[in-house]
Amino acid sequence: MDNAVLNGFEQALWFAYGFTSPDLNPEELFRECFRRARQPQYQKDPELLQDLEMLYWLRRQRQRGNLLSADSKYVSNSWQNTRPVDPDPRIIGKSQRTWALLIGNSDYSNLPLRGSRNDAQAMKNYLEDYLQVPKAQIQILLDANRAEMVNALYDLRDNSRIRSGDNILFYFSGHSAAYPAEEYITTWPEKLATIVGICPIDRGKSVPDISDIELNMILQQMRSTNITVILDCSYSGGAFMTPPSYEHLTSSRPHCPTSSGIRRMLEAAYSNPRRTPIFPPIVQSEDGDPSVPSFVLLAACQGYEHASEIGISEENPWRSARTSSLYGHFTCALLKVLQSELARGATFESITRGLPVLRTGRSMNL
């Protein structure tokens, strides 16, 4: 089918669903259709079901590189022209009640990265030097294995110093993988989602990735509802679509390597002795649905895309360069925007929409 026809279908659906922005976001459109399909009043709507099936097919084609997206039109470096400004004193006051876990994994045995450790360190510098978050409230892990990453998340959950209303930040930069949920989940529309796994440094046959389902389970039990998740990794825009409830995970296709990987991730999650089954969770979404993530997600790319890295000049860290230190393109742009006049009075949504399109095609990393 012609690419223009497919993009026209998405564009028409975008406005039919009430989105007012003229810029089509295929991942946001898929999420909205997915959300509606999970509501009882829509579950037997044949038109909605056809729309979701079509959007799912488009999503898979883009993951495989067989189809261009309507929003992948250009690469913009306009964020480099923003000017740094001093932090807002009101933000500094709130930063005293901020708790952060930052993870940057670069030294993978297969396809090592060059920028992820720099990303985590740059995020730490931003929190400490710009926002003046107390150093004792920031934990940074570089080239962390699975046990270290999961235990750090549970330590953040169990931190008795965190009070209701405090700010919690989880940041990850590194490799990630996308697992088609249909190869493990049988219920509809959950099986049309993608399970995203962030990769520990020791990932392999005996060490699974950390699924977004496991992350969601832990984040839902944090002591505060003010949670921000930043993922600078491939497929990150597709994370947290699958509800963290075991009843959806009832079968797998025999002899399917992908479903085997999903099974190992979920078995590791549900067998962890630190897991505390709580229902309803401490943190819930605004509509009270415990399966819907209640935190803000800032993602480097769409659920069908790869993230990328960019060289930054040491002489002028506000500019990119061909021979320089590497950073995640998204992290670099985000930190520049957060320290500029664009962040004054902004919300997470406006910051996200203000970021340029950073797509550079399929990256050799991340």
Image: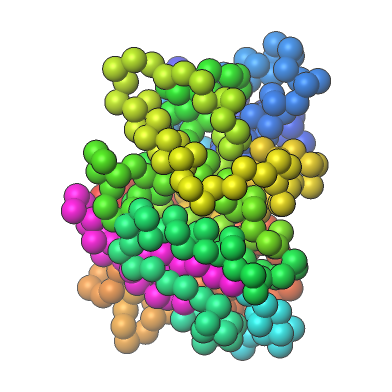
In depth, the one of 222 and 274 nearer the eye is 274
Q: From the viewer's perspective, tell me whether residue 151 is left or right of residue 19.
A: left
For the N terminus, the quadrant is: top left
The stretch of residues the image draws in magenta is 99-124
Picture coordinates of residue 7, whole percent (x, y): 54, 30
Residue 181 sits above or below residue 139 on the image? above
Residue 310, compared with residue 268, is above or below; it is: below
Nearest the eye: 122 or 185? 185
> Does residue 175 appear to the left or right of 22 in the view shown?
left
**Position of 215 compared to 281: left or right?**
left
Give x and y (percent) for residue 35: 68, 32
Q: Which residue does the image show at 25% across and 70% down from the upper left?
A: 322
Colour option used: rainbow
Instruction: Where is residue 305? Give x, y as percent.
Output: 42, 43
Q: Residue at x 51, y 72 (%)?
A: 335
Residue farthest along the left direction in this orientation: 109
Where is 7 relative to 225, above or below? Answer: above
Which picture quadrant has residue 207?
Answer: top left
